[in-house]
Structures are given as C-alpha cells and as structure tokens.
Amino acid sequence: MSASYRIRSAAQADGAFLADMVVEAVNWRAGGARPRHEILASVEHGRYIAGWMRPGDDGLVAIGPQDEPIGAAWFRMLPRTEPGFGYIATGVPELIIGVRPIWRAHGVGRALLRRLMDQARACGYARLSLSVERGNYAVTLYRSEGFAVTSPGIGRDTMVVRLR
Ligand SMILES: CC(C)(COP(=O)(O)OP(=O)(O)OC[C@H]1O[C@@H](n2cnc3c(N)ncnc32)[C@H](O)[C@@H]1OP(=O)(O)O)[C@@H](O)C(=O)NCCC(=O)NCCS
C-alpha cells in the first residue's frame, strides 16, 4: 500500500480534513468516540485548526489512490496566551498528526512526520514540540524520530525534537 499514496503540501482548502485529523488524535483510543462537533468546539482542541491557514502554518497531506486525503501532519505557532497542550516556548511550533484508521500502520505517519520535520528545519526552526496522551503508541513513532519527553504532565507528555 505504501506505493499508492503521495504527499503534498497542505493548502487552505484542507482545513476540514485537518479538523478530521484533530478528531482522530483526540479519539485515538480504540472505541474513542467523542463527537466531532464537541471536540472542534472546545477551545483547547479547536485552536489547532482555527483560522487555518494562517501565516506561519505549514503542513502536509497524504493522498491515497482515489485522490482522497488519508493523513496529515502540520505545525502552527500558538501564543503563550492561547497555548496548545504541547506549548513549550515562544518560537517553537507545535506539531499535530493523524492518519485515517484504515491507512494506519503502513508507514504513512512516519513519512509525514519525517517530511514535516524537514520542512520545519528548512523554515529555520530549531525545535518542534507536541503533546501525546500516555499510552498512545504514537510515542514509539515520535521517540524513533528523535523526540524526547521534556515535561511529563497529568496523563499526557510534551515531547520535543531538535532540528539542528
Ligand atoms: C499515530 C499515527 C499518526 C501514526 O501513523 P501511522 O501511519 O499509523 O504510523 P506508521 O505506520 O508510520 O508507523 C510508525 C510507528 O508507529 C508505531 N505503530 C504504528 N502502528 C502501531 C500499532 N498498531 N501498534 C503499536 N505501534 C504502532 C510503530 O512504532 C511504527 O513504527 P514501525 O512500523 O517501524 O514499527 C496514526 O496511527 C494515528 O493517526 N493515530 C491516531 C491519532 C493519533 O494518535 N495521533 C497522534 C496524537 S499525539
């Protein structure tokens, strides 16, 4: 399956799909079914996509064989006054990633993550951060790509990767 998808830059029109991926990230547990509207209406989750795409937002979308979006990874700079769960400092963008369930475990997430790290490096960023709930196997992916836990929180960890 890995040969049948491609990755392109995210555009403004991808906002609704990115919102889908925020919902996937919140509902990562098997059986996780918090309603989409409730997740996106919440200030703390909604801020990962509110107003997409703003200056400084950057992302990638994986596209499947029927030209359908199957996964996305993006970063945005959230201010200290309206931080994401993975906020660590001014000037450090926070990363979000999600892959449609039927496409998981086929390398799409790792490919998106690697490409996005390259993109952030090319933009001149020194670090990327993220937040992951404890128990989510995504941690294994992040660790294997160089992320390390900086601040353990209640039920979730903030992880950071150095890009240079
Ligand atoms: C996390 C996620 C983005 C990873 O994308 P993916 O395409 O499934 O990941 P990949 O196929 O590239 O696998 C990357 C690594 O993740 C881990 N992984 C993937 N699927 C796994 C599974 N079912 N069980 C345990 N580990 C798994 C492995 O370490 C894997 O590396 P390996 O293939 O070398 O063993 C995707 O599974 C997802 O959307 N999950 C739900 C949303 C979510 O949790 N987002 C992150 C919130 S912080």
Image (tube, rainbow, N blue to C red):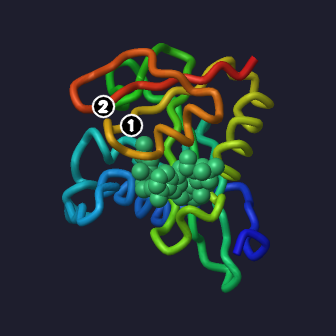
Residue placed farthest to the bottom in the image?
66
Which badge, 2 or 1, is on the more N-terminal residue?
Answer: 1
Q: Where residue 32 sits: x, y (%)?
A: 24, 61
Can see residue 53? no
Residue 156: mark = 2
Residue 161: image tag: none
Q: Quadrant of the N terminus?
A: bottom right
- What is the number of callouts on the image? 2
Numbered disc 2: secondary structure: strand
Mark 2 crowd level (few <14, some 14–19, many ≥20, 10 Å Cα): some
Relative to residue 132, is residue 8 depicted above or below? below
Residue 5 in the image: state x and y as whole percent: 72, 71
Quick check: is the Cβ at mark 1 less than 8 Å away from ligand 1? yes
Q: Which is more toward the observer, 103 or 24? A: 103
Q: Which residue is mark 1?
A: 132
Rendered image quadrant of residue 153? top left
Mark 2 residue type: Arg
Q: CA distance from mark 2 to mark 1?
A: 5 Å
Are dots 2 and 1 in contact, CB under 8 Å? yes
Say left or right for 34 vs 82.
left
The amino acid on which the numbered mark 1 sits, given as a three-letter code, is Val
